[in-house]
Image (tube, rainbow, N blue to C red):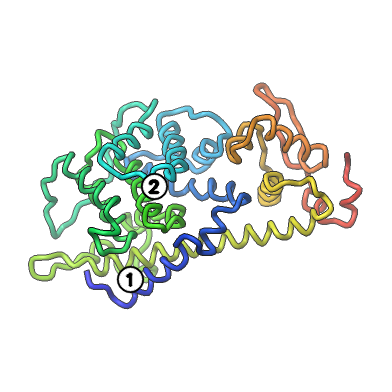
Amino acid sequence: YYPTRSIVADLDDIDKRCHEGSWLDLATKARNTTYFLVEAHVDEAIATLQEDGLSIGYEKAREVLLAERDPESSEERLLLNWHRAAWDLEELADAPCTPDTILAVYERVACGVEGQTTRPSRQSSRLWKRKQLDRPAALALAAKLIEENSGAYDEHPLLLALGVRHLFMSVLPLPAWNGMVCSLMMKLLFRKTHRPVLAFVPIVKASREWERGALRPPAVMSSVADAEVLVGDEVDYTIHINVTTQLVRRKLDEVESELKRMLKRDEAFVRALRDDLDINHRQRAVLQVALSNPEAVFRIESHQKTHRVAYATARADLYELVDLGFLGRVRTKRAFEFPVTPGLRQLLMGPGRKNRPA
């Protein structure tokens, strides 16, 4: 490919915003963004499932990822395994990436899941023939791309990640769930190359939207079919990369915009609740969701898992919000549920808030 001005500008912008220490990096590490980051995983998780020929509805995926209920199918178990592995990738960032690393991640993803019977979305091209790499060779090359990115390859991590995706989805080196494992390896590459924010950008979702024709000119500069150009005996991927970097930058804009909106809303909460010194960041996160979705129902188990606290701490958080009048408490067959109090916004922001019910 030829590094056009557009590609260079996109990659430079992505670097500035995704590198360790950037505003976005610090924002994603803030405690009160945990719930947002879990929500951000939903769309990417659904798109990643589609890489392996599976589908799941948004609400079902959201319920499982937010630990509002246990998985009830192989798809849901696979989704939860992927999500948990994504959160634990930081543990692998400082260790060498080898084919055994990839296989270990595969074992985590496949744990408790029935064998794959669906057909994955295999990558192909009308201009080139797929190289006959065997599975061990493909895994070794993928591991090398991930591990030796700072020395052996003078290439941007985003483009290396696209190469990793191509390897997985053209060769299919794993027994199953190549799409799920591939997305985790892309995220690991971003962490190893000190672009942690890219791990939260739905790159697979953006790529799939373009590849299946949901995004067409003029929304993008080219269709997938016209993005590969034969120059002599080689395929020129300049257009392909140009479109991809633009799509990633757009998704990054969406992530940043949503984070800023959420943090601005949180600042308003800090001002509105300045007299309530006992309202912690977890409880503010609950109230943020409650204001956005008055129909939301909270549970101790999902609150516990979202914020990674003890059950007793999660229980105390929600019970205190009940005592303050912000949530209700309803007994169900399984456990207590905590619906949003009607008129919560007026209760929080109104002049009579100090006289809230005890």
Q: Which residue is mark 1?
A: 221
Left or right, 132 with reference to 83: left
**Figure quadrant of the C terminus:** top right
The circle drawn on residue 71 is none
Image spot of residue 91 (x, y percent) = 43, 42
Residue drawn where x is 75% and y is 56% of the image: 270
Residue drawn where x is 57% and y is 50% of the image: 36
Between tags 2 and 1, which lies in front?
Answer: 2
Density class for disc 1 (Cα within 10 Å; few <14, some 14-19, many ≥20) is some
Left or right, 145 with reference to 110: left
Residue drawn where x is 82% and y is 37% of the image: 323
> 219 or 270: nearer the eye?
270
> Mark 2: which amino acid?
Ala
Image spot of residue 224 (x, y percent) = 27, 61
Image spot of residue 259 (x, y percent) = 57, 59
Q: Earlier in the sequence, mark 2 or mark 1?
A: 2
The secondary structure type at the circle numbered 1 is loop
Identify the residue at the far left of this view. 233
> Mark 1: which amino acid?
Met
Identify the residue at the far bottom of this view. 5
**Vertical side of 216 occupied by 35: above or below:** above
Report the number of discs: 2
Distance between mark 2 and mark 1 Cα atoms: 35 Å
Q: Which residue is mark 2?
A: 93
The secondary structure type at the circle numbered 2 is loop
Residue drawn where x is 39% and y is 68% of the image: 219
**Vertical side of 78 occupied by 293: above or below:** below
